[in-house]
Image (cartoon, rainbow, N blue to C red):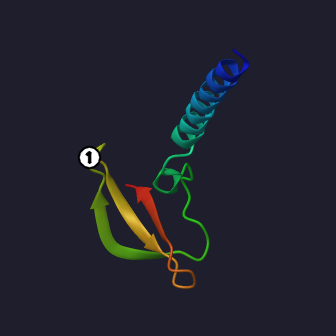
Amino acid sequence: MNIINILIGWQVLSVLLLVILGIISWMYFDKRYKKSETKVPSGYIWTDEISIDPTSGKRERVYYNPDTGERFYKEE
């Protein structure tokens, strides 16, 4: 009887950890394109590139940082 309780407890703990991991992953999923900044950070230069966000249909101007290679998208 004791081994059955241990196995059931292990399965419940595994499911609980999986749910917690899923919630944490959902909260932090792909935040790199969802920047809340409205001002272009210093060091970024204006480019001619304009992209259209496929989910919202909004136009976004692309700014480029030549030192780090990072890109910043600002809604127009």
Q: Say which amino acid is labelled 1.
A: Gly
The residue that appears at 56% across and 45% down in the rendered structure is 28
Q: x, y (%) of residue 51?
A: 29, 62
Q: Quadrant of the C terminus?
A: bottom left
Q: Quadrant of the N terminus?
A: top right
Label 1 belongs to which residue? 57
Q: Nearer the viewer, residue 1 or 28?
A: 1
Tell which residue pokes out farthest to the front in this image: 1
Q: Left of 3 or right of it: where is 29?
A: left
Q: Which residue is at 55% across, 48% downward?
A: 36
| Horizontal and vertical percent position of residue 24 | 60, 39
Which percent across, then down, holds residue 67?
A: 57, 85
Q: Which corner quadrant of the image does residue 4 belong to?
A: top right
Looking at the picture, tell me which residue is in the foreground, 5 or 42: 5
Q: Please give left or right for residue 21 compared with residue 60 in the image.
A: right
Q: Residue furthest top?
A: 1
Please name whichever residue, 40 or 12, is drawn nearer the observer in this view of the structure.
12
